[in-house]
Amino acid sequence: MSKCPGFFINIGKEARDLLHKGYGQQPPVHFHQQFIDMNCDLSCDVSCRIEDIVPGFGTAFKLIAPYTGKVELQYLHDYAAVTAGTGVIANAFRGYDPIISFSGVVGSTPISLGADLVYDVSAKTFNRFDAGLSLRLSSVVASVTVNDKLNTLRASFYHTVNPLNQTVVAAELNHSFSINDTIFTMGSQQAIFPSTLVKARVNTKGKVGALIQQQFFQMLSLSIAGEVDFHPNSLNWIPKIGLTIALRP
């Protein structure tokens, strides 16, 4: 029988990666440097996973400097996956706060249900409480999640049009209950050469983005992304350009 497709973070991952990965989403706490009239935000993302340290168990380490770092113990079964971890998360006012996290998924390849919890030890509050449902078919992946402590409803759709040239379309609907605001984002990707991938996206807030990713030697990839806000009321009309370098040993 098929194993559970992943932990909670993998629910809706395909659509998120197409629509957001590589576009340089700035976290709430970030390292910022200004050079004359140019702003620069820097981060470093390092992750490592060791499988089957004992049958069924694995461990993972993830560092996004200078924002967060976490060590996890993972258990994977045919129809369930559980992760428990501890780490730190950056706080704009007092350095770093210790956190405890727990996530789990039950189901099989076609359908899975999961939840994700993060507890802030210093503040004695839950930083995160998410839940989600995923449906996975041969060329279509659909998901519905409730995020931001059940404040945000997110529905996503991912469809592989042509696997030979990696032509894919995706759409995502986000609704915030607290401010009664809805954002719809759609995008697509295509490999114009075997090692060159092009992506584009647009949302109902008037933001248009594009990205080109070049793969080198199957280990090193370079991505250049840009975004422009065409919303009539936007004060941030200056185009944003980002550079991402990824190394996968």
Image (tube, rainbow, N blue to C red):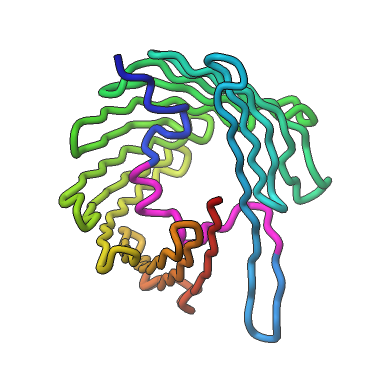
Residue at (61, 52) in percent of width and height: 45
Front-most of residues 142 and 228: 142
Q: In the rendered view of the protein, which quadrant contains the N terminus? A: top left
Tell me the quarter of the picture where residue 62 sits. top right
Furthest toward the front, the residue is 217
Residue 10 in percent (x, y) is at: 42, 34
On the rendered structure, is 159 left or right of 40?
left
Classify 163 as above or below 204.
Answer: above
Furthest toward the left, the residue is 161
Residue 60 in percent (x, y) is at: 62, 32
Badge count: 0
Front-most of residues 124 and 43: 43
Front-most of residues 227 and 222: 222
Write the start and end of the magenta stretch as one range.
14-31
Residue 134 in percent (x, y) is at: 32, 28
Residue at (80, 30) in percent of width and height: 122
On the rendered structure, is 190 left or right of 231?
left
Residue at (54, 23) in percent of width and height: 103
Question: Chief secondary structure of the magenta span?
Answer: loop
Furthest toward the right, the residue is 94
Residue at (52, 69) in percent of width and height: 243
Classify 112 as above or below 96.
Answer: above
